[in-house]
Image: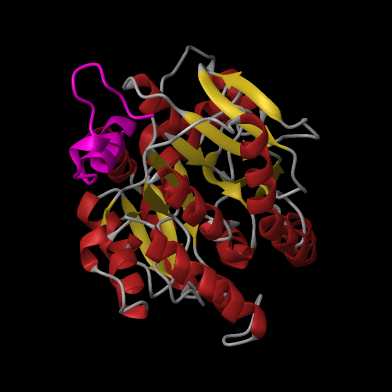
Amino acid sequence: MLFLMFVFPNMDKSFNMYTTISKQFALEGNQVTVVAPGQHGQATGIYIENGVEVLRVKTLPIKNVSNWRKGISNLLLPYQYKRALKEFYRDSSFDLIILPTPPITLADLAAKLKKRFSAKVYLILRDIFPQNAVDLGFMKHDSIIHKYFRSKERKLYRVADYIGCMSQGNIDYVLMHNSELSATKFHILRNFQYRYEEFGFDKIALREKYGLQNKFVMLFGGNMGKAQELDNVLELARRAMKYSDAIILLLGEGVMMERTAKRIEELGITNIKIQGSIPKQEYQDLLSVCDVGIISLHRNFTIPNIPSKSLDYWNVGLPILASVDRATDYNIILEHTNTGLWSYAGEHENFFKNFEKLYKDSELRKYFAANGRKYQQNYLMPKQAYETIIGNITSSKYHKHGDKTLS
């Protein structure tokens, strides 16, 4: 089986959803090959990471770069992957090809590999592009570049035999805007993550390390880009300054970090701390000693987003305080799971009132936290994601029988 991946950290050092599902397939006895960008100038070659064979391909930078540089990197990616596969796996054959969005630019490569190997293609849909770029003002609807990427998107949906979406809202949106597609290839594949394991650390010392002792800590972790509309978080912080022990920790990286730091200074906000990315295990440990996890989605989104950072919040037992757009069904998930409070982006007073509810009610926080852990353990484990994927591949050729495995 072949995984065509995009954001794929070194499996020996970190993890995300895509390293997790690759590892889960390997643990289930399948022969797994991953193709992913090289890291930090890493030469193209085959590496064994956490017991999984990974073909690292030297590419242009794809993280923390301008949109036009990221666009060029995405356009070159299928050619770089194709060349590397030809060099290192010329005589190999694959029965199943799994790839995520982003990016959509691997559509042509997936189509060629599907035809060459008579393989099935499974798409993990986690990003609806180019519409999200239109929503954020990065490109104009019906412009030449939009039409180009829209054609790639349509092709990717056609090539995929199975499409796993984060929520019913995702499925409804894609079918509404791609009426030529059959609903039978779509199903819900929730985000997933291994259960958080606390390996023993001094919680007081960890809080002291980051200057959080005796504070009510709201953490916003992960990517800091335009999609997160960080101005919502800054306005929350400004209003929360009336509570001397309340603090917001921005933990991560992204293209909006420099602008955000300037805005914090301009607005005279004194209750925000900024911390760059840290190792994943320490990140989860730090989350576990915070009080609230913040979600912020840009108000202009017309596509339903389910923020993946929620996985970490649910996993460690953080109640969620969310500011969301009007297209998402993420707020419905929060209500059904009883794991947090939400308001619409731009409704600053409601966002602040929800903060106050969580700030003042420790029992409510404990209730949301317990429900989050329960939701993650019951519905968001990699084993369940694996079973969902395999369960939707109906041909017996793609199921394990006895000691036969996917390859």
Residue in the picture at 45% in, 62% down: 156
Asked if residue 74 lies left or right of residue 357, the reply is right
Q: Nearer the viewer, residue 264 or 61?
A: 61
Asked if residue 400 lies left or right of residue 53, the reply is left
Residue in the picture at 36% in, 55% down: 357
Residue in the picture at 33% in, 33% down: 382
Residue 154, image x, y percentages: 45, 71
Q: Residue furthest bottom?
A: 142
Over which residues does the magenta segment extend?
378-407
Q: Is residue 317 visible?
A: no
Residue 402 colored magenta? yes
Residue 350, image x, y percentages: 41, 70
Q: Is residue 91 visible?
A: yes
Residue 241 colored magenta? no
Residue 391, image x, y percentages: 20, 41
Find residue 332 and report its image quarter: bottom left
Asked if residue 237 lies left or right of residue 343, the reply is right
Find residue 177 and report its image quarter: bottom left
> Is 259 drawn above or below residue 119 in the view shown?
below
